[in-house]
């Protein structure tokens, strides 16, 4: 009986510390640039189940608003300014975003993929 209790307590402690370690993990950083009222890259691959720090740089002299209904985010980027938006952890799928001030050209999508490293390697090989 004591063996079972010991195992249960050990499992519980491992779960708590494992969850805490994941929540304390440093977020992955990705950059999106606004130039000529367009987002670059227009499609951004990110890993699933990971906290993401988006650095959004506006190289235009006019402001833009980074907005996403899918991510529940909305933030103005001043002309020649930079903002940070935290998202995630995300489930696999596509998360659209747009620039509200230039909605006809400022469109993008964040694609959360489970096999992120493999996808990135494949993308690099395609470019070569």
Image: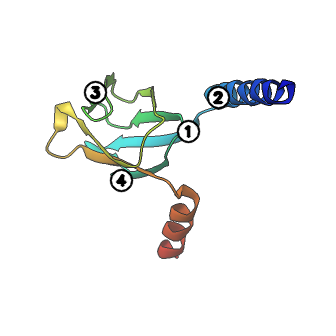
Sequence-wise first label, 1 or 2: 2
State the image quarter where residue 19 is shown.
top right
| Label 3: which secondary element | loop
Which mark is in front, 1 or 2? 2
Residue 23 lies, with reference to residue 128, above or below; the image says above
Which mark is in front, 1 or 3? 1
| Label 2: which secondary element | helix
Residue 48 lies, with reference to residue 127, above or below; the image says above
Residue located at (33% from left, 32% from top): 71
Residue 39 lies, with reference to residue 26, above or below; the image says below
Which mark is in front, 3 or 2? 2
Q: Nearer the viewer, residue 47 or 53?
A: 47
Instruction: Determine whether label 1 and label 3 are within 8 Å by CB.
Output: no
Q: Which residue is mark 4?
A: 43
Q: Which residue is mark 1?
A: 29
Checking the image for residue 63, the label placed there is 3
């Amino acid at each position: 009986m004591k063996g079972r209790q010991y195992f249960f307590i050990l499992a519980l402690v491992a779960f708590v510390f494992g969850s805490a370690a994941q929540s304390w993990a440093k977020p992955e950083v990705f950059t999106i640039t606004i130039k000529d009222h367009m987002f670059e890259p227009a499609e951004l691959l990110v890993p699933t189940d990971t906290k993401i720090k988006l650095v959004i740089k506006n190289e235009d002299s006019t402001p833009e608003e980074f907005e996403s209904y899918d991510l529940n985010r909305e933030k103005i980027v001043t002309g020649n300014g930079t903002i940070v938006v935290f998202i995630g952890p995300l489930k696999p799928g596509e998360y659209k975003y747009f620039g509200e001030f230039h909605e006809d050209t400022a469109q993008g999508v964040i694609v959360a993929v489970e096999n992120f490293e493999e996808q990135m390697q494949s993308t690099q090989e395609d470019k070569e």
